[in-house]
Amino acid sequence: MSLATNLPRVGEGNINLVQLSYRDYLSVEEINAIEHEVAILGQRQAAGIEAMKLVQKNRGWISDDCLYAVADLLQMPASQLEGIATFYNLIYRQPVGRYVIHLCDSISCHLTGFAQVSEAIKEYLGIDYGETTSDGMFTLLTNACLGSCDKAPAMMIGEDHFEHLTPQSATDILRQLCAENDKDELNLRE
Amino acid sequence: MDKSQPDNPDTSNPAAAQVTVHIDGEPVKLRQGDNLLEAMLSEKYNLPYFCWHPAMGSIGACRQCAVTQFADQEQQKGKTIMACMTPVSDGMYIGLNHQPAAEFREQVIAAMMTNHPHDCPVCGEGGACHLQDMTVMTGHSMRRYQGQKRTFSNQYLGPLINHEMNRCITCYRCERFYKDYAGGNDFSACGSKNQVYFGRQQDGILESEFSGNLVEVCPTGVFTDKPFSAHYTRKWDLQSAPSVCQGCAVGCNISVGERYGSVRRVVNRYHHDINGYFICDKGRFGFSYVNNDSRIETARGIELSSEFKPHQLAIALARYKSADNFGIGSERASFESNAALKHMVGSENFCSGLTDYQHFCLDIIRSVMSAKQPPSVNEIEQSDCIIVIDEDLTQSAARIALAVRQATRNAAFDKAEQLGIPRWQDAAVRTAGQACRSNLFLLQSKSSKLDDVATYAEPLHPAAIIKLLQGLGNANQPDSISDMPFDNGLASLLQEIKTALQHAKRPLFIAGCSAWQLETLQAVEQLALQAPPHWQFAFLPDAVNTMGLASLIDQHTMSLEQLIAKSLQQSTVIVLEHSLSTLTRAQQYQLAEQSQTLIVIDHNQSLLSELADVVLPSAPFTESDGSSVNYMGLVQPFFAVKPPNSPIHPAWHWCLLLDSTFGRQNLANITTLSQLRAYLAEHDSSFPDMSRLLAEQLLFKSARQPMRYSGRTAMFANQTVHEPKSPQDTESPFSFSMEGAGRTDVQGQALPKAFSWAPGWNSEQSVYKYQTRIGGRMNHRAEAITVARGADKNLAWQQRKSDTANPGVLSFNGLLIRRLSHLFANDALTDDIAEFKLLAPVACLLVNPADEANLAATSATHVTLISDDKTSMTVRLITCDDVARGTAYLHHPLLNLHNAIAQVSDIVQASSDDIARQQQGQSEQLQSILNQKSRALSRLQKRDQQIPIQIVGEGR
Ligand code: SF4
Ligand code: SF4
Ligand code: FES
Ligand code: FES
């Protein structure tokens, strides 16, 4: 956005317009990786999703500053990038837990026991949709159809799909993830 | 005199064939290729819709416009289709009231209502809400949904627009208007599924000059008019009048709403050739000076009771009688007021109220206009190659900037047409068009908000712009242009423009006066006079009625400088609705001191009215009838929304009243506006005959008040139990009552409407019922009356063009310092509006980084401009390469009131004291604006409790 067409206004008080420059915020590796995507896609703005995925991989989620930095790098309005960020449910605009559970709530899963699975997970973790467990392990979200309708109900955690869920199997999976995580941490400490 | 009707045809798809479609069994003729929704609405069917918009086309998002398309004439089998996505074709069988489709429409509403709050009673849209109308129309009368509703938090969007997201029905109209149509980039649709949010990325002032249209574009109460909400009345309780925006020379048509004596809001009033469905924020929010503390409501300098008789006025004024009387006209006063003043003092004693410099500009405009009829806004939208010359249209004639933006889409429309995509298929046309744009060359010295759609928008030095224009006029030597010191590549730019012009069918040049660069205008003039016939030129004068005033100028007319140079010791000078802010403070004093008597007729106080011996209260456009003449030379009448309270009178009426004391007694027997118009038409060759426009309509009045106007008999009950007689209006086609709504005239012609309403259609969408067809002209008879184009020039202006200093431009060290033009800080009147003051830029100087070194102030945050006479002003320094090298832009609030700094002898880094003072001044200013705003509001609200019974002056 050009300065000359967007002058500070009286009603905004004496705030100095600080513009976040991507250089101050993104690492050189991030910038290079994003530029690589831009080169492939041809149009800067088209790289929005990939850019955010790259940054999210490093930082866990997309903060406001991340959003402004990426928008600045891609030379697009922040509002437009926000539209993209909030449309795709694999871009997180809030801090999330180590594991993000995307439980499918679309029609096939609804018909095959989604409700019970959902209840079981919520009860096991003690959280509702959109929330993160206090130990920072799990965030629970819904998801539109995961493409596993023939193996419904289904959920996705990280890059793994889990299918034919029952309340029991769903909580088992979570328990197992906890255990693995504990093991990882033990290993790290040793 | 040129009284011909501008013959611009309705432009959307003119040649399409009519075909027969059967709707619920009835054969109807519809236009082939239109979408079915538009075609059915054109035939005045009641078919509900949300996402389709007459100016923005269809996207098929809301599913509200469902109808049944039958397989054959048996009308047994059929499918549900979206009317807005279906082209009309011959022999269609359509079921509008067919059960499954009707039920589908009802269920679409039911689904929307699962999230829509039940808050109509506290919603600003209530009573004028498209969602309410459609809900009733589909018959959805019971709410069965018991579950939770989605809730959002709202954003602060600045002082003009309220945000209440829970009311959203996800039709996407707002985003399509704000982003796609108006080019705003601080607004988007966020989220997905059941959680779609429309707003900014974060709280903050909406940046678009057209944000106010969201109020009308949104079919629900998500976006509402904030100042209106603060002092609110339901639409059905508003008394309205058709009016004309006074914000700039475009003359957009508006409808003004009033209640309890104060003006509440302005909405768009559809005009096919000018504003269409949209106005800018200056037009929508720029009226509130009529409610301000600064209004002049009584006479000053003479004793005058509110019910004075003309002879009493003459007695009161007798002591001011002098040997000679001069009148100063004004660009913002009505056509009639200016003409009345001129005829009162006589043409030898008439001063236009313009400076020499303005006269030169005007002279050029008129000379161009006499060669080229300026295109209407609608025609501008049809142009396929536009060259904007040194004018930031987004700030000086915003509605035209919006039209220019649409014009850049013509290439995309053409491409879509080749691909067989109808124009109304909005999403498809945009996808097919992508970056395909018609040529738009912005020859400007500072970037503007049209840059994003321009072929060329690099800032150019004004001298380079002049060179380009000269090059364009010179067909024989295409490449002879040399580069300017700062601007390389001029030759190739010139070539590019020439090529574009060669291929263009309807090329258009647009220039204006806000850049204060006479040489540029002269270059445009030369170009226009030798241009091929199909090149169009639009020239934008300064103010709402500049062209009306211009048409009254004759060989005797004086400029302000000429008047001041006269010895006025024996003279009375009468100033008509003009604050003379084009003069310096010293010149204003000089005028006041020199003249024996200074009489100011105005509606709001100004620095000048403080100096006057006599101040007479005039009625602003909301309280008087009159007309103004827009940039095309079109005479547009406006009507009072309420009568003025005596002793307030329309300015033209003051001229009639003053005639016996200060005039030539020619106007003695005239008391009404129609008499005045008749007199002027007869005695002044430059005044058009307006009787055709009005006479017939006077017999058949339509109502200013809706049928449900409430409280009529109770309004004054705290003062008298008798219901006061409603004010009579013999002068306009509108009554100050509910009488006459929906009437037609003798020939069954529809009457013009004071506000837009139709049975079942309470929102502004109702306008389609009164159009010949969607996007066409209004169905009431509207004669277009124009003033004469390019009458003979006043020779005085021609001779002295070259040696007059340009008052709007300062210079320093080779740096050309121009005034910044800004929509909310362009003129003294709207300077009085709190919201606009908040939206105006902070005091600043904009320079190119390369020029920064020229100032003795490298890397300073603030600079102080010092003039020879030791006046100084400290402003924020903003460096950016969006300003051409060698030019700078200055904004300071005082520049609007009077020329606060006459020349610049130095620009230095501001001392910390200066900065502190400047910033303190700024925060004090902010605080005082906010205080003023809340004071004004509480005063108006208090007045609602005690409405003065209107004592209406004669000859309103
Ligand atoms: S805010 Fe209004 S215009 Fe925008 S999508 Fe919602 S209902 Fe439609
Ligand atoms: S473009 Fe001019 S006339 Fe139209 S609404 Fe804006 S200020 Fe008023
Ligand atoms: S509906 Fe759940 S995977 Fe398709
Ligand atoms: S108006 Fe046709 S789908 Fe919205």
Image (cartoon, coloured by chain):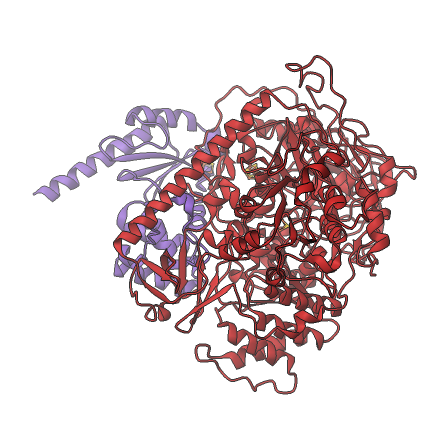
Chain colours: A purple, B red
Residue B820: give x, y in percent of width and height: 48, 59
Return the x and y of residue B921 as percentages of the image width and height.
36, 46
Along the viewing direction, whichever of A164 and B858 lies nearer the viewer = B858
Q: Position of residue B879 (x, y in %)?
A: 37, 62
Q: Would you say A137 lies left or right of B337 here? A: left
Q: Quadrant of the N terminus of chain B?
A: bottom right
Please, which residue is most extreme toward the left here?
A190
Residue nearer the viewer, B888 or A167: B888
Q: Residue at x 49, y 66 (%)?
A: B809
Seen from the viewer's position, the closer of residues A137 and B492 is: B492
Relative to B939, say whether B64 is above or below.
below
Looking at the rendered structure, the number of numbered marks drawn on it comes to 0
Does residue B149 appear anywhere in the picture?
yes
Asked whether, in this view, residue B889 is left or right of residue B543, the answer is left
Q: Nearer the viewer, residue B505 or A138?
A: B505
On the picture, is B489 further left or further right than B286? left
| Res B13 quadrant in image | bottom right
Residue B184 in view in this figure: no
Which residue is the extreme one toward the right?
B747
B881 w.r.t. B694: above or below? below
Percent x, y of residue B211 = 54, 45
Q: In the image, is residue B408 above or below residue B288?
A: below
Report the residue at 30% width, 29% height from top: A171
In which quadrant of the rendered image does the C terminus of chain B lie? Answer: top right
